[in-house]
Amino acid sequence: MPITDWPAAERPREKLLNQGPASLSDAELLAIFLRTGVNGKTAVDLARELLATHDGLRPLLEADRAALCAVSGFGGAKYVQLQAALELGRRYLESALKRDAVLNSPDRTRAFLKARLRHHGREIFACLFLDNRHRVIGFEELFGGTIDGASVHPREVVKRALHHNAAALIFAHNHPSGVAEPSHADRAITIRLRDALALVDVRVLDHFVVGDSEVVSFAERGLL
């Protein structure tokens, strides 16, 4: 039965308008994005199939083009739309940390770093550059690969800090395993970076490790 024949209270669009987006299931939200189904399947049926095939919402949203477009009803146009929607979400979070914004909310910082780093399939080391009032100057993903002495170079971090004329930094990197617990290598490189930056009067305020469901703060753990 097509969605237009469903009771009004059960149609995803009407439900969103009457009860708000939080009231919708993942399948219902995805169905609104898809707009139409395929022969014999409503948009909700197609959404449920996509979620089941990819074992949930996050793996679906992080799937590559080939995997998504292999599903009947999800072509190249929808893939482009999905990537645009995801990037809009990331930029929305980043706008809260735009230049000259005062960084005084750990939760907002966590949300931004999660959106920027969690989806990467490899470890990415990044920096938030701040002025002496902890206002955001910029954000850069500096290194890719494993966090160790060979892949994160203190000299390059110092150069970027001086380039931005930063007074303070916040480090962040993701764990593709999904476990946010800091490793011995994470702790060692953080100390090396802190000591190198101290030589040019740049303070390290924190280092966040981004996992699937948790973002761990070195400062909160007393590791700085």
Image (spheres, rainbow, N blue to C red):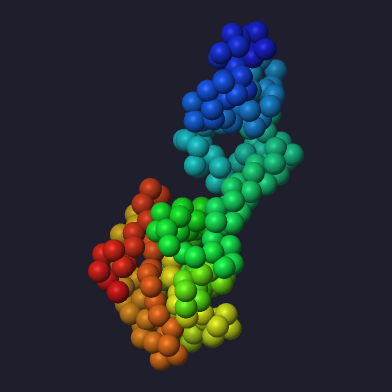
Is residue 27 visible in this depiction of the protein? no
Residue depicted at 59% across the width and 47% down the height: 89
Name which residue lies at 62% across and 39% down: 68
Relative height, residue 160 to residue 140 (above, below): below
> Residue 128 location, x and y as percent?
50, 69
Q: Nearer the viewer, residue 156 or 149?
A: 156
Q: Quadrant of the N terminus?
A: top right
In what quadrant of the picture does the C terminus appear? bottom left
* Residue sitting nearer the eye, 118 or 132: 132
Q: Position of residue 91 (x, y in %)?
A: 61, 54
**Residue found farthest to the bottom:** 199
Count all numbered tags in the image, as a single digit: 0
Between 98 and 117, the one lying in front of the other is 98
Residue 76, position in %: x, y? 73, 40
Q: Is residue 112 above or below residue 191?
A: above
Q: Which residue is depicted at the point 27% across and 71% down?
A: 223
* Residue found at the very far left of the displayed protein: 222
Vertical side of 86 occupied by 154: above or below: below
What x and y, as percent, mark residue 56?
A: 47, 35
Residue 121 relative to residue 78: left or right: left
Residue 42, visible in the rendered structure: yes
The structure residue drawn at horizontal position 61% and vertical position 27%, both measured from the top left corner, is 31
